[in-house]
Amino acid sequence: MDPTIDLASAKAALDDERAKLVHQLHELGADESGELTGDVDYGDAFADAGAATAERTEVLGLVERLKRSLDEIDVALGKIEEGTYGLCEECGKPIGAARLEIRPQARFCMECKSKR
Ligand SMILES: [Zn+2]
């Protein structure tokens, strides 16, 4: 039997994770929407333009990943508001408190996740 999902601690974990992601995005010179704000000038730090381009591509990849994680967290926070948090998006069954504790933004139960 799964213990009941503690929504307050799930929300706290999600808020915490969200703050970390936003911080990481800012450090990469991007805002919450994943747009580069232009505060970071990639050109100056590198003598070689090729290296600057490679660095920029890498940063954009990182920003993209962070943004996707941020979206997942926002979806999870929205579900807490709606009262559907902890239910699998695929089959509608409970995802399970143990899984949510490890991954509070999980959208699918283990069974559906393994099928994807
Ligand atoms: Zn499922």
Image: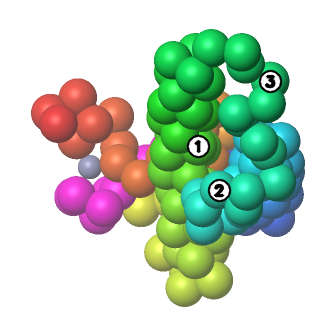
Which residue position is annotated with label 3? 45
Q: Is residue 6 in view from this perspective?
A: no
Crowd class of label 1 (few under 14; some 14 to 19; many from 20; radius 10 Å): many
- Image quadrant where one finds the C terminus: top left
> Which residues lie in the magenta part?
88-96
* Mark 1 / mark 3, whichever is N-terminal: 3
- Give me the C-alpha separation between circle 1 and circle 3: 19 Å
Query: For mark 2, what is the residue?
Result: 36
Q: Is residue 57 above or below residue 29?
A: above
The three-letter amino acid code for the residue at tag 3 is Ala
Between residues 22 and 18, which one lies in front from this camera angle?
22
From mark 2 to mark 1, how far is it between C-alphas? 9 Å
Q: In terms of secondary structure, where does tag 2 sit?
A: loop
Residue 10, given in percent of the width and then of the height, sits at 73, 55
State the residue position of label 1.
63
Q: Residue furthest left?
A: 115
